[in-house]
């Protein structure tokens, strides 16, 4: 008996089984994620110092470091009243203190409209 021959050949390529299609989809996803992360990094570099009221009614300062600095209003008032003491202390201990250079865009505080201390 002669070998059977197929009269219809299915040449369709399943995208799930095609290694090139899988790689192209992964590459597209990675490029999209890279773009998103790059934009987030740019936004983080241009952040300014911001004030917010916390859930518990304290004042949180964002943008100075990785975590916010949060104190109640009366605690901030005590610290602000000690401004001269802080400046003298910094001058006297300048050689012992580390200094973190501000990122681009940092250095100017922006207070929410209508807030007063």
Image (cartoon, rainbow, N blue to C red):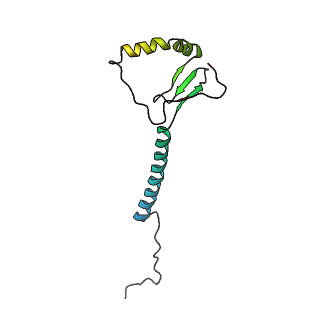
Where, quadrant-wise, is the C terminus in this rendering?
top right
Residue positioned 44% across, 34% down in the render: 103
Relative to 103, 74 lies left or right: right
| Position in image of residue 44 (x %, y %) | 48, 38
Work out whether 20 lies above or below 2: above
The image quarter in which residue 115 lies: top right
Q: How many marks?
A: 0
Observer-nearest of 3 and 114: 114
Relative to 63, 96 lies left or right: left
Observer-nearest of 104 and 41: 104
Residue positioned 46% across, 45% down in the render: 37
> Residue at the left extreme?
95
Residue positioned 42% across, 13% down in the render: 88
Where, quadrant-wise, is the N terminus in this rendering?
bottom left
Work out whether 29 lies above or below 65: below
| Position in image of residue 33 (x %, y %) | 47, 50
| Position in image of residue 32 (x %, y %) | 48, 53
Work out whether 20 lies above or below 48: below
Work out whether 59 lies above or below 1: above
> Residue at the bottom extreme?
1
Observer-nearest of 73 and 85: 85
| Position in image of residue 52 (x %, y %) | 59, 27
């Amino acid at each position: 008996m002669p070998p059977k021959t197929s009269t219809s050949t299915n040449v369709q390529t399943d995208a799930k089984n095609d290694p090139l299609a899988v790689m192209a989809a992964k590459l597209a996803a990675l490029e999209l994620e890279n773009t998103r992360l790059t934009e987030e990094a740019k936004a983080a570099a241009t952040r300014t110092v911001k004030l917010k009221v916390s859930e518990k009614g304290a004042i949180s300062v964002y943008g100075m470091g990785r975590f916010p600095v949060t104190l109640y209003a009366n605690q901030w008032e005590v610290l602000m009243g000690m401004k001269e003491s802080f400046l003298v202390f910094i001058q006297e201990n300048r050689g012992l203190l580390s200094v973190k250079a501000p990122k681009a865009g940092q250095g100017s505080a922006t207070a929410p409209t209508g807030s007063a201390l």
